[in-house]
């Protein structure tokens, strides 16, 4: 049986949004837990007057609020702030605290580019695509053409983020720019994939024309699309849809319409999460 710990603070009815890591927390316990989850993204400016007020007034944690306020006044760095908070958490072992601090210390030696790139990639993996695009656009504004490999990596990941937002035409431009930088075939494959989803069949065939490279990539792309289609048709989501459709054909049309509305709303909420 797991250990039971006394909460560090009360649970707030109003969340505090940690913009740096794009997470909302509802208590001092959740705040400290998140520090351990994303140590490489933490910065001292995350801890501010708004957080202190929230901990004091909404979480009934005046001691925690006062401790952070003292650290800020003393201009403590991120390692001192996080170390002090981890000591307050009974659910964080000394070994785990050492690991978290080590990650922060190691990341401090990273360049500003590496830090911003890591943040953009973090948002990408967390499906916060608009946030990722914002980070990548900033990075591109700071890079010179001579840094071709870095530029290519940023353009490619920005293309991935935009394609997840269904901005296929913009994504195609990003993938092609990435390919122009370092000739990596993965960029060109992604470029062709975005064209496939942007153009009609007729337009796509005309685009390929007699281009041997496009034809070669298209053969692999079509094989991958066919495999993805077959995998989806065997998925529980698709089989559930078929069952509901069959019930609708047999007279349960109202229930089937409700099912479609529910699925559509789920997709809308999922998309909104990507954008906002």
Image (tube, rainbow, N blue to C red):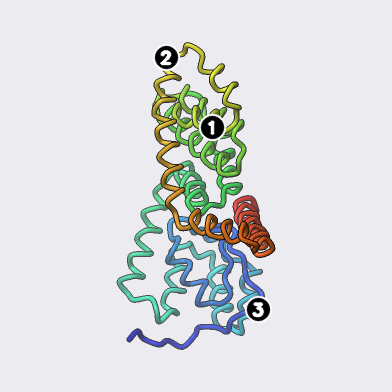
* Image-based side of 164 in relation to 106, left or right: right
- The answer to which of 248 and 108 lies nearer the viewer is 248
Separation of marks 1 and 2 at Cα, in angstroms: 18 Å
Vertical placement of residue 118 versus 64, above or below? above
Q: Secondary structure at mark 2?
A: helix
Residue occupied by mark 3: 13
Quadrant for the N terminus in the image: bottom left
- The answer to which of 237 and 126 lies nearer the viewer is 237
Seen from this angle, which residue lies furthest front? 250
* Image-based side of 102 in relation to 164, left or right: left
Where residue 103 appears, as percent x and y from the top left, is 37, 58
Where residue 220 appears, as percent x and y from the top left, is 39, 29
Quadrant of the rendered image containing residue 4: bottom left
Q: Earlier in the sequence, mark 3 or mark 1?
A: 3
Seen from this angle, which residue lies furthest top? 210
Where residue 110 appears, as percent x and y from the top left, is 41, 47
Q: Nearer the viewer, mark 3 or mark 2?
A: 2
Q: Earlier in the sequence, mark 1 or mark 2?
A: 1
Q: Which mark is residue 212?
A: 2
Residue in view at x 50 percent, y 56 percent: 237
Q: Earlier in the sequence, mark 3 or mark 2?
A: 3
Vertical placement of residue 261 versus 227, above or below? below
Q: Secondary structure at mark 1?
A: helix
Separation of marks 3 and 1 at Cα, in angstroms: 43 Å
Q: Dot 3, crowdedness within 10 Å: few (<14), some or many (≥20)? A: few
Residue occupied by mark 1: 194
């Amino acid at each position: 049986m797991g250990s039971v710990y006394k909460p560090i603070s009360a649970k707030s009815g109003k969340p505090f949004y940690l913009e740096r890591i794009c997470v909302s927390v509802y208590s001092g316990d959740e705040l400290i837990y998140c520090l351990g989850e994303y140590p490489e993204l933490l910065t001292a400016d995350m801890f501010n007057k708004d957080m202190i007020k929230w901990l004091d007034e909404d979480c009934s944690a005046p001691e925690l609020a006062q401790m952070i306020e003292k650290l800020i006044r003393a201009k403590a760095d991120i390692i001192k702030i996080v170390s002090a908070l981890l000591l307050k958490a009974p659910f964080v072992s000394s070994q785990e605290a050492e690991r978290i601090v080590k990650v922060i210390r190691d990341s401090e030696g990273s360049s500003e580019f590496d830090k911003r790139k890591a943040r953009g990639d973090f948002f990408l993996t967390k499906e916060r695509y608009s946030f990722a695009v914002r980070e990548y656009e900033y990075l591109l504004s700071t890079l010179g053409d001579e840094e071709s490999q870095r530029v290519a990596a940023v353009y490619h990941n920005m293309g991935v983020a935009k394609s997840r937002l269904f901005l296929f035409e913009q994504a195609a431009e990003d993938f092609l720019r990435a390919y122009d930088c370092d000739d990596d075939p993965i960029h060109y494959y992604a470029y062709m994939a975005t064209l496939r989803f942007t153009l009609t069949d007729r337009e796509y065939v005309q685009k390929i024309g007699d281009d041997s490279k496009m034809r070669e990539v298209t053969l692999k792309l079509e094989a991958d699309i066919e495999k993805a289609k077959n995998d989806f048709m065997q998925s529980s989501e698709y089989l559930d849809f078929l069952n509901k459709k069959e019930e609708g054909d047999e007279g349960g049309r109202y229930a089937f319409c409700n099912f479609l509305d529910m699925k559509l709303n789920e997709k809308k909420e999922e998309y909104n999460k990507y954008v906002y």
